[in-house]
Amino acid sequence: MTSDITRIGPPPSPGAGPVPPQGYEAMDDHELLRLHVAGNPDTFGYLVKRHRDRMWAVAIRTLGEPEEAADALQEAFISAFRRADSFRGDAKVTTWLHRIVVNACLDRIRRRQVRAADPLPEDEDRAAELAGPAEDDPAEVRERRLDVLNALKQINVDQRSALVLVDMEGYSIEEAAAILGCAPGTVKSRCARGRAKLLPLLRHWQTTRGGSADDVPAKARQTAPTAAATSSGTGGTE
Amino acid sequence: MTDAGLPTSEHLEHLDTDTIADLIENLLPAPEAHRAREHVKACPDCQQTYDALLQLTEDLADEGRTDIPMPADVAEHLNAVIASESVLRASTVGVHSLVQLREEPHRHLPKLLLAAAAVVVVAGAGVVGVVLATADHSTDGAAGIGSPTSVPSITTEQVGPDAQRWLEGAKGPILHGEAAEIDCARQFATTQPDSELQLVQPATVDGKRSTVIGLPGGSAGDVKVFVVTGCSGSGGPATPFYDTTVTLRNR
Ligand SMILES: [Zn+2]
């Protein structure tokens, strides 16, 4: 090839140069992000890989729909990628990422509300898939996860966002109010009303707590998530 | 719970779940809160609901601490998006640093930006006078777009150089593909500062069926090249996943 090319091409760089992959795996979040800001093309991918399941949980709980959650996460990660230099080193990277994801989800909700209420189609297979690959977690964990996702989908988005932030993600009322752009009292009220709506949908959790769940055949319980709210929750018998 | 049983005394008229949830959050006005608290103490049913609500908050917190595995297809797509974002950043860095590169050849640039920087070298080829080995990617001067409906298979790194060659080899705009695909590109163009289509070319880019769209860039001879998905088959909307700018030497 033309020798010009080799002349123009940048020399191997000392700082952000090749690091063996296990080197990236071992680096902490701050270091990965610092290298990303310095121009390393790979380290952000490692950050994404490390935290995507956590962020997926936040997005799918807040938005309810996998397609929406996937889009929101994509926006969030691109946004984080581009403004990584605005990250303040004294915070935790996960706290920062988490906040970006939450905001991306809320943005989508607001846009969806503006677009009017066109209910998204239900997708049973997809819902089951969301509970995670079968081999990864015990059946009860998957089932419980799906129950919560289904129940959250049935309450209104304002109550759901407040509950996910406060009860599930552990934000304080004040933090949640700042994120949601409303008064702390509003957050409390949305949480209270959201819990009241969730309670009948998830009450079977509490009745099957403490071991009785083992007696119910797995197949019978699989059909239970929403039906259990109206039945006694002890499982169906044919 | 609230089984609307006949009130045998005013104290035994059950509280609804909302009221109990409000009580827990201290949202009730003082007199009402007092009455509600007294009722819960005296009524096993409402006490049970009260406890269940507290338990629910704990259960939600437990559940909130567990991650949910991202479905494989979502993760894969996300990886691809982040990877192209990296390439995009690299090429942008490259554009801005071309001059610096010449003046400051030892400027620090991450090694893996090399490939993307090469794209930019071609974009600026009129100045630098280098023709890259992009001929390897295609068999002839027509650069793999012989007929209006052919779909060349290229990588994102080739998008810039190929688009440049296609456009330099044509007298005017190139609008290839089915009408619906071109319409979709036209729709996409309206979201951009200058919507006059210079190039629409169906292509498989990094394995994804895509549409390469060229629009006038900032200055004369510049063409902003986008690679979008969504224009073939589904009829939109176009979702860009890569873009670059090329400078045509003959315009
Ligand atoms: Zn009562």
Image (spheres, coloured by chain):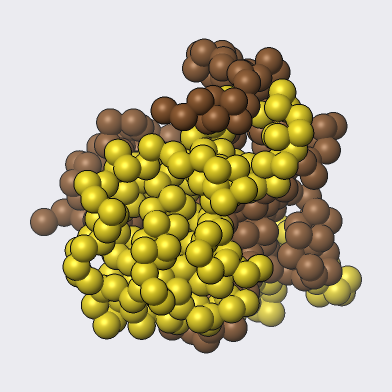
The letter of the brown chain is A
Image spot of residue A107 (x, y percent)? 63, 67
Residue B155 appears in the picture as rendered: yes
Q: Residue furthest right?
A: B30
Closer to the camera in the image, B130 or A152: B130
User: Residue B152 at what x, y percent from top left?
Assistant: 25, 55
Q: Nearer the viewer, residue A206 or A23?
A: A23
Residue B215 screen position, x and y as percent: 51, 72
Residue drawn at the location 34% of the way across and 31% of the way down: A136
Indicate whether A234 appears above or below A16.
Answer: below
Q: Of A63 and B207, which appears nearest the observer?
A: B207
Write the residue at 63% across / 21% down.
Answer: A11
- The extreme left residue here reads A238
Residue at (83, 38) in percent of width and height: A88
Compared across the picture, whether A152 is left or right of A224 comes to right
Residue A116 versus residue B51: which sits nearer the camera?
A: A116
Q: Residue at x 38, y 37 (%)?
A: B133
Q: Is residue A144 left or right of residue B196?
A: left
In the rendered image, residue B179, in percent from the top left (x then y), is placed at 27, 82
Chain identifier matching the yellow colour in the rendered picture: B
- From where the camera sits, is residue B59 visible? no
The image shows residue B185, relative to residue B144, as above or below, that is below
